[in-house]
Every structure is written in structure tokens, then in C-alpha cells.
Image (tube, coloured by chain):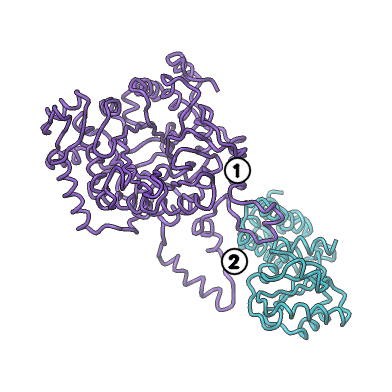
Chain colours: A cyan, B purple
Amino acid sequence: MNNILGIKNSVIAGEDELVVELVKQALDTEIAVSTIVNEGLIEAMNVVGSKMATGEMYVPEVLMSAAAMQLGLEYLKPLLKEGDVTSRGKVVIGTVQGDLHDIGKNLVAMMLESSGYEVINLGVDQSIENFLQAAKDNQPDVIGLSALLTTTMPNIRENVRLLREAGINAKIIVGGAPVNADFATEIGADGYAADSAGAVALVKQLLS
Amino acid sequence: MLKGGMETSALKFLTEEDISKIHRVSMRVLAEVGVQITETEALDLCKEKGARVDYANNRVYFSEELVMKAVESAPSTVTIYDRLDDTRNIVLGGNKVYLGTGGTAINILDLDRIRRETTTEDIANTARLVDALDNVHFFVIPCYPNELDTKDVDVNRFYHSINNTTKPIMGGIFTVDGVDKVIKMAAEIAGGMDKLRERPFISFIASILSPLKLDNDRTKILFKVARAGLPIATSTAPLAGATSPVTLAGTLVQLNAEALTGVVLTQMVNPGTPILYSSVPTIMDMQTMSFLFGSVESGIMNAAVAQMAQFYKLPLYSTGGISDSKQPDQQAGFEKALTAILPALAGANFIHEAAGQLDSGMTISYAQYVIDNDISGCVLRAVRGIEVDEETLAYDVIAKVGPGGNYLAQRQTVKKMRTEFFYPKAVNRINYEGWEEAGAKDTWTLAEEVAKEILIKHVPQRLLEEIDQKIREIEPGIKVL
């Protein structure tokens, strides 16, 4: 079990190369793949989540841990059987047309990934056609729309309307500096969060 | 964590020529105007050491030669020690910046926001609070125990400070024999007078009055501490416009003469006495006749005084982080930040009054200590400035991230984020909704929460039981809390 503890600790420390090395060693000692995944990689992210909540870990450290976990998972991919890892849900996310801002939206994407969600990050300045196409191609559980400018906020409203009209069966969440909970309710979105941690909590709640 | 003792000379109000002019005029003041001293032992000593003494008028005149000889014999570095180990020593001198508390208030704005008189318990509590606040580097005993008999005040002020923090301590003395009691007690704790002199963890203040005079008791205390060879500050607080010239330059001239008088007297008593060049420049409000502590002019003069002390190669007792506001409000915030950062950026050594005081020094507040700990942290971050080297210039990470990427999940970000940025404790840095949800608290409220938690949880390194018992036997006037 020392190997598992090592994997867990190196994920928490964000030591991505060490994680892969220890995963290899664990496989050599014939530890089950599901044990490595669940008790090593995923358990580490649970610890990271609570350390972030208490303020002990900062966001960049969480992202490093998530990257380390992903690398470990990547290495194990060919060996994974059905049911070894379960995605907690699929999220399509993007910044609406006319808006080139992306640091907040990317942060939400990264935090969702760190929390075990599969994220399709469309990027910035995305037309409604692109959102619709991505929704059809990926069948996401959640669609996230982002805007930073007050001038592009109306595009969020329009996107929500068109996604609903097209019958897309996904929860729609909205965010960005000018957006607030009242606006989200008014335009018929399913949810709003003020920051990346809030976004993760929101998605978790919507999919529970 | 931002350590004390970082150096800077980022800010200079005075040119070399200005410094030299102030020096020259101060020398003339000391030689031709002189200083009023009434204590006969001091007058005799001044005469014996070569000063011109006019006994009829209690006036002593110091020549430049005499002054500069004292400046030479005074140490350029004075260390005040952590009581237990060397982790929190303050090494005063040069351009090293430290910030700490000041005194002596008689009121406290308590955690229930009611203002009342301070007691011995407040000395113990502030010491314990400061013990836990990283950016407060030393403890000047901040308040007066109003409930005690005068004869017990000195020993109680020092005892309850020493027993509640291991940070370096300084305090004013209220009775002449109080200083003997305090030194005896500290020697007992240190394991002997020699050990106390070797590693002084307490130090004293005996004020010189503006303009240019010493009272008998303060002179006696000064002499006692100098004979004991312990660190001392001769805090002088001229009020520009009232007890010193209205011009800032004129106040600096007089203050310089007063600070150097402290140096001369201590070196006459005991050459090598660890003396701090001591200054508390303030102004008087000409509209209201109020004594002002937190004026921007104080900040400017305190920065200039740092340059003067550096010119003489003497460690400095400086002042900053002060306010005339009555509660932890906006005025307190800006006055404290301004008056702390100005001397700090000039490399002032011992910036006292920089935590907990309000109301021109007459009132303390537990919450204010927490807020000032944050202000001092910001000030220290500015003192540290910008490190420029190959790693910090960050070409490699700029190239790795590339146009349109982000720096969040980069190793350098994780490695440096805690030290490149300072994180205050009692401020609002969340978004509007988050702030509202958390109760829409202001800094005062947040700081009260931090202060309460520290006062409930923090246990300092107390005195050893056996030493404690022995001290209490010698000094039965020490209050049991």
C-alpha cells in the first residue's frame, strides 16, 4: 500500500513525473488498476479539494495536482476496464461571440476537470452555431456560457434562448464579471456561480 | 512570511547637502542654545566630561567635538533579543526595517466596541496577540494598568509583557526605582546581569522633552539604564508649530539636537551604551490646537530622520503607522498606511507605534493590531521591492505559455505565488456576491474575528515555573491574572 500512498502524496504535491514513475512501480507489484485509480489518484484529489476549501492550497497548486492526476490516468488508459473510472459528467464551455476574454472561463474549465468532469473547452468568441454543434456532437450534461463585457452579455441571453429552442437537453450555466444570479434567473439559465469554486459546486448540485 | 530587517533606501527626502546643513545647524543649537538639565549629578558629569555648564541657569552646552565623540562611541548596531532563542531578534542599524507596537495608551476600544480604561490584563492580552502576529516584530508596552498603585506599575508592565511574548520588548518607566526592579527581574530571567547585558530582551524609554530639556526623573532613569548597559531610547516628540519650529526643516534641526543629546548623555555615563537615535516628530493642528500623530508631515519627517540616523551611523528609534482617528475606520487606514510606508521606504529601523494605537496614541484596539499587522505586511512587501534576476525575468515561462495561454498551472507560479504576493488576513478580496453571502463584513469586523480567535487559541512560551515563582517572591506586587 506504500505505493498507493506515494501516488496519492505526489498527486497532492503536483509532482507529475513522479506520479507516472510510481504508477509504473505499482503496476509492477501487481496492484489492481482500479485501486491505483480510486485510492491513489482520485483520493488525492479529494484531499486537494478539502485543502483548497480551507485555504491551505491555492488554485495554481490545485491545477498542478489535477495535471499530475491526469498524467497518471493517461498512463493507465490502455489498461482501464469499464467501470474503473467514471466521469462525473460532461461540460461544454465557451466565451460567447464578440468576447475575447478567457482567463475566468479557463479557470472554471480547469477546476471542473480537476474535480473529475470531462470538459470540452470551445474557446473565446464562439458563435451560437458553434455552441449548438458542440452540444449535438458531445451530448453534454452542462453547457457553460461566459462573458466579461457588458456589451456581450446580451449574447448570453440569446444563446440560452436558441439552445432551448433547439431542444438541447443540457443544464445551462452562466458566468463572468458583469453576470449575476438575477440575470441568470431572468434569462432562464439553470444556474450562476460567482467564481470557479462556486462553478464546481453548482455543476455538482445540478447533476446530483 | 515577510521577515523584519529587510533593507531599503528607496525613498530620500533629503539630499546629502540638506543632511549636512541640518547637521551644522543642530551643532550650533547644541553649542550656543544648549540644553536645560536640572539633575545635579547629570550637570556634574557633563562638566567633568568637558561640556560647558551654566549652573545658575541649568544650561549645558555641547561642542561638536564632544557630540561627535559620543556618536563614535555609541554602537552602530543594537540588537534586542528574542527572550528564548535568536529567531525573533531585531538587529537595529543601517537601513534595516522593523515595525512594532508603541505606547502608552490609557484606554482601549474593546472587542465589544466599548471604550474603557486599560488594565494589566490588556498588557498581557496585547503581548499575546502580538506574539501571534507575524508582521509585528517587537513589543513596546502599549498601555497603562490604570487599576494598579503607581509603585507596582513598572514591574507589572514588564512582567506581563515578558510572560506573554518572546518578541523583543521595550517600555517606558514610570517610577525611578521601578527601573531597578525591572532590571533585577529581567536579570533573574536571563540567569544573571551579565547574561542580560549580553542578550538584552528588554529595553527602555526615557523621554527628552521638547524644546531641548530633560526632567529630573527621566534623567535619573536614563543614567540607571546606561549604567546597566541595556538598550535605551530617549524618545523626543516635538510638536512642530508649538514645541519646535513650524518648518519641517527647523523641527528636524531641533529633533536632531535632542536625539544627539540622548546619545551624548548615555555615552558620558557609560561609553558603548546601546542607545537609539530617538525621534517622534509630530505637528500641532493650528486650527484646533490638537496634537497630531498621524499627519503626512510626521511621515515625511520620520523618513528624513532615518536619513539623519544613517548619516551618523546610529540605530534609529522611529515612528509610523499612527493615526488620530478614534476608531478603526477609513481615516485610521490611510493615516497608518501613509505614516508607516514613508519611514519604511527610507530604511527606518525601529518603527514603533505601528500597531494597535488609535486616537493619537491614547487608545488601543485589539482589532486594530490585526489590521496593522496587514498594513505592516504590505509595507514590508514594498520594502522588499522587486527582485530582478534571470529566473524572475521569466523568459522561459513566457515562451512556454505563449500568446493566449495562461500562467496558472505553471511550476513557477506555484513556487513563487506565496512570496511574490502578500496576502493580508482581514480584508475583502472576494467578489460582491461572495462578500454579501459572508455577511458583508468590513475590515474592522474581520479583524475582530481574527483577534478573538488568536486570544482564544494562542499560547505563548511562558516563563519557567521555578523562575516565575522566584520573581513573584521578590516582587509580591505582581498581579495574578
User: Picture coordinates of residue B58 (x, y %)?
Assistant: 17, 29
Label 2 crowd bin: few (<14), some (14–19), many (20+), radius 10 Å: many
Q: Closer to the camera, A204 or A69?
A: A204
Q: Is residue B410 left or right of residue B7?
A: right
The residue closer to the viewer here, B130 or A2, is B130
Location of residue B31 (image quadrant): top left
The quadrant in which residue A203 appears is bottom right
Q: Position of residue B333 (x, y in %)?
A: 50, 52
The disc numbered 1 marks a residue on which chain?
Answer: B
* Residue type for callout 2: Leu
- Amino acid type at mark 1: Glu
**Position in image of residue A184 (x %, y %):** 78, 70
> Residue B319: which disc?
none
Q: Is residue A157 in view? A: yes
For residue B253, above or below residue A120: above
State the mark number for residue B448: 1
Does the image show residue A18?
no
Image coordinates of residue B107 in percent, x first then y, are 50, 34
Q: CA distance from mark 1 to mark 2?
A: 33 Å
Where is mark 2, residue-wise?
B408
Screen quadrant of the C terminus of chain B:
top right
Q: Nearer the viewer, mark 1 or mark 2?
A: 1
**Which chain contains the residue that carries disc 2?**
B
Q: As drawn, which residue projects farthest toward the front?
A: B287
